[in-house]
Image (cartoon, rainbow, N blue to C red):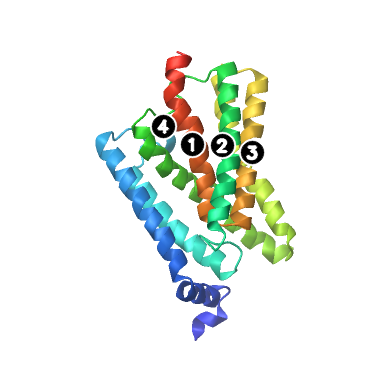
Amino acid sequence: MFYKNLPYVGNILAAISSDRVQYLVFIGLSFVILIFTGVLYYSDNQIFQRFIGKINPILAILLAIILGIILFSFLLSQKWFAIFGKETLDGVIRASVLAAVFGVIMILVDMKIVFPADTNILFPESILFYPAIGFFVEILFHLLPVTVLLLLLNSILKNANIFWISFLIVALLEPVYQALDMANSSRYPLWAVLYVGLHIYLFNLFQLLIFKKYDFISMYSFRLVYYLFWHIGWGYIRLRLLF
């Protein structure tokens, strides 16, 4: 058939046919995230504005879901990554332990420099907000740039180094965004800006390594547990301890 003459298309169609369960897991997770987003939007239509501007968050999540399906169709067809797998439980457990360490460290940093009172979305909205925004971040900051870079690097290098190169580059996106935001506020000492940038860089790098070793669910769990410690749990406690 004609599509077999097009780069990757034949493999992608084969992946869709053979990896239906993978897609069902992603679609199931996406449906839950969509519900969370809808509930938050209709209870407070400005809760997402600080992160995605005036874009309708339901539309943003829908587009992220569609983009995720397209990107995973390519990644699964190349056998580079998985949405979930036989070692998912092991991956989730290990990711959760490591994420808890990152969360505790950030709490200690906060106790030293004290981030603004409005750093975190308040409880109970935080329970729905952080899984939703975390899903969005994984698609935009990890899945999309990793896929694009791997596609480019694979056509040039064609060896295992493409993963390390792409991870080291993609891991920079979120920390640069966060560090620039801190630097522009001019309320933090230089060491705090540098440390937070390094902290988030390592956080992202470990996430990508977990993604490669295990799967998307494990990588997403890493962020969820980190958010549970730093944004949800500590986000509730810090307002009573620090302000």
Q: Residues within 10 Å of mark 2 (few under 14, many from 20)?
A: many
Q: Which residue is mark 3?
A: 201
| Circle 1 SS class | helix
Residues 229 and 119: in front is 229
In this orientation, does residue 65 appear?
Answer: yes
| Foreground label between 1 and 3 | 1
**Residue at 55% in and 63% down:** 86
Please provide percent x and percent y for residue 20: 44, 70
Q: Amino acid at mark 4?
A: Arg
As drawn, 110 above or below 134:
above
Q: What residue is pinned by disc 2?
A: 100
The amino acid type found where label 3 is placed reads Tyr
> Marks 2 and 1: CB-CB under 8 Å?
no
If you read the primary sequence from the N terminus, does the residue marked by circle 2 or circle 1 appear first? 2
Q: Earlier in the sequence, mark 1 or mark 3?
A: 3
Mark 2, secondary structure of its residue = helix
Q: Of tags 4 and 3, which is closer to the observer? A: 3
Picture quadrant where residue 187 is located: top right
Position of residue 125 measured from the top left corner of the image (x, y, whole percent): 34, 33
Q: Gap between marks 4 and 1, in whole Å? A: 17 Å
- Residue drawn 71% across and 52% down? 165
Evaluate if marks 2 and 4 touch, with contact meaning CB atoms under 8 Å apart: no
Residue 87 lies in quadrant = bottom right
| Vertical side of 110 occupied by 88: above or below | below
Q: Is residue 14 above or below residue 60?
A: below
